[in-house]
Image (tube, rainbow, N blue to C red):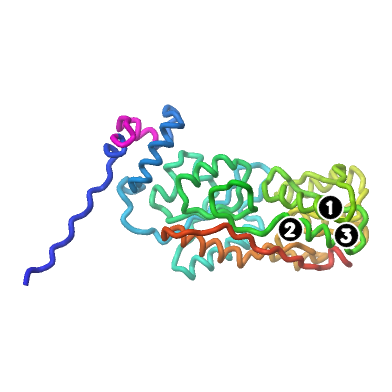
């Protein structure tokens, strides 16, 4: 009986093939794949689209076609913008723990980075270069156009954040508008007369929480006062400095909805140092429910983002996309966690 013959290896797609399909030279393809500014954006995107359709991958070891999965997932924490959280921020640490556990349960490793995959040219990202099978991006950031372009080329991504209109990628997060309403309604329900907002609405998720704040005020028959909507960044040190400026301008409010737990805790520290009592003088509600919120003094009332469940959900949806399946944006229901900072 004749022995089985080894199957022939399928011919790999070459740069010449991509050039022929795109109607350009190999030099143009090489420059397009390396992100050269000499290549027009329209041409570069056409070359990348053809390369992806032809299953052409640049491997960091031999620049050859990737033959098997890496069993690694890149987790991107974009930190380029001043005032955003550091990689050591409590929210990121809590979420990284949840993601690490969820990936480990699925037999995957976690590759951590802080540089957006499109900054060095789209083709140099971890998916294209064979370092990872997919990417989880922590936050949509302020450059939504770049994120949209990247997602149009590489659908194997899941983004943590708020639901925005017309996005072309899968999002997992809480309903930020509902969460903002929930926090504000609580402060109104406990008898607070002047409820302010603290956060940076330039961040998409914070803008949604601010919208929830405004809706809750309107539903209670209260006018929105721009004078008590204060700008503050995610970074703890900068948030405390912002809180100190707010206090120096006069405390004409008896409650604050802070757009993150870090902002809330920084604000409480600044209030206490200025001689104010939380919650007697000013009630505070945060957003996230990071682990340290329950152990702060006073314990922080906050809106839970269900971090553990969010990490599991992101991993499950990303693996579906990697397998070629479909995944839908998933918004988890926010939950009000009442503690000492709002009720005393």
Q: How many marks?
A: 3
> What residue is at 7 percent from the left and 69 percent from the top?
2
Local crowd size for mark 2, using a 10 Å CA cut-off: few (<14), some (14–19), many (≥20): some
Residue tagged by mark 2? 178
Q: Is residue 334 left or right of residue 11?
A: right
Q: Is residue 85 magenta?
A: no
Which of the two discs, 3 and 2, labels the residue nearer the N terminus?
A: 2
Which of the two discs, 1 and 2, labels the residue nearer the N terminus?
A: 2
Quadrant that contains the C terminus: bottom right
Q: Is residue 42 left or right of residue 159?
A: left
Q: Which span is picked out in magenta?
A: 20-32
Q: Nearer the viewer, mark 3 or mark 1?
A: 3
Which of the two discs, 3 and 1, labels the residue nearer the N terminus?
A: 3
Q: Is residue 122 above or below residue 136?
A: above
Residue tagged by mark 1? 270
Q: Which mark is residue 11?
A: none
Q: Is residue 142 left or right of residue 184?
A: left
Q: Position of residue 309 (x, y in %)?
A: 61, 67
Quadrant that contains the N terminus: bottom left
Residue tagged by mark 3? 188
> What residue is at 10 percent from the left and 68 percent from the top?
3
Label 1: state its secondary structure: helix
Label 3 to label 2: alpha-carbon separation: 15 Å
Label 1 to label 2: alpha-carbon separation: 28 Å
Q: Is residue 25 magenta?
A: yes
Point out the residue furthest to the bottom here.
Answer: 1
Q: Mark 3 near mark 2, Cβ–Cβ under 8 Å?
A: no
Q: Mark 3 near mark 1, Cβ–Cβ under 8 Å?
A: no
Local crowd size for mark 1, using a 10 Å CA cut-off: few (<14), some (14–19), many (≥20): many
Q: Position of residue 288 (x, y in %)?
A: 70, 60
Q: Position of residue 18 (x, y in %)?
A: 31, 38
Point out the residue furthest to the left here.
Answer: 1
């Amino acid at each position: 009986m004749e022995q089985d013959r080894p199957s022939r290896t399928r011919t790999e797609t070459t740069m010449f093939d991509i050039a022929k399909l795109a109607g350009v030279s190999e030099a143009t393809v090489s420059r397009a794949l390396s992100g050269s500014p000499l290549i027009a954006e329209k041409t570069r995107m056409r070359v990348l689209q053809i390369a992806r359709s032809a299953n052409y991958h640049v491997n960091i070891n031999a620049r050859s076609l990737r033959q098997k999965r890496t069993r690694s997932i890149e987790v991107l924490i974009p930190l380029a913008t001043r005032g955003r959280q550091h990689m050591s921020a409590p929210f990121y640490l809590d979420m990284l723990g949840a993601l690490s556990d969820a990936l480990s349960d699925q037999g995957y490793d976690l590759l951590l980075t802080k540089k957006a995959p499109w900054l060095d040219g789209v083709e140099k990202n971890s998916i294209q270069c064979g370092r990872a099978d997919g990417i989880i991006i922590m936050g949509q950031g302020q450059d939504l156009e770049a994120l949209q372009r990247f997602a149009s080329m590489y659908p194997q991504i899941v983004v943590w954040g708020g639901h925005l209109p017309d996005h072309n990628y899968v999002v997992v997060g809480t309903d930020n508008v509902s969460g903002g309403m929930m926090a504000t309604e609580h402060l109104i329900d406990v008898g607070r007369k002047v409820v302010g907002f603290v956060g940076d609405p330039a961040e998409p998720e914070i803008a949604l929480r601010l919208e929830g704040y405004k809706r809750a005020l309107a539903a209670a028959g209260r006018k929105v006062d721009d004078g008590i909507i204060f700008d503050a960044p995610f970074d703890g040190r900068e948030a405390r400095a912002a809180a100190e400026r707010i206090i120096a301008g006069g405390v004409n409010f008896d409650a604050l909805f802070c757009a993150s737990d870090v902002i809330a805790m920084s604000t409480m520290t600044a209030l206490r140092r200025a001689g104010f009592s939380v919650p007697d003088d000013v009630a505070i509600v945060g957003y996230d429910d990071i682990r340290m919120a329950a152990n702060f003094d006073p314990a922080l009332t906050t809106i839970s983002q269900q971090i553990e469940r969010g990490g599991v959900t992101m991993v499950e949806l990303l693996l579906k996309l990697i397998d070629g399946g479909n995944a839908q944006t998933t918004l988890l229901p926010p939950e009000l966690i009442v503690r000492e900072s709002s009720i005393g």
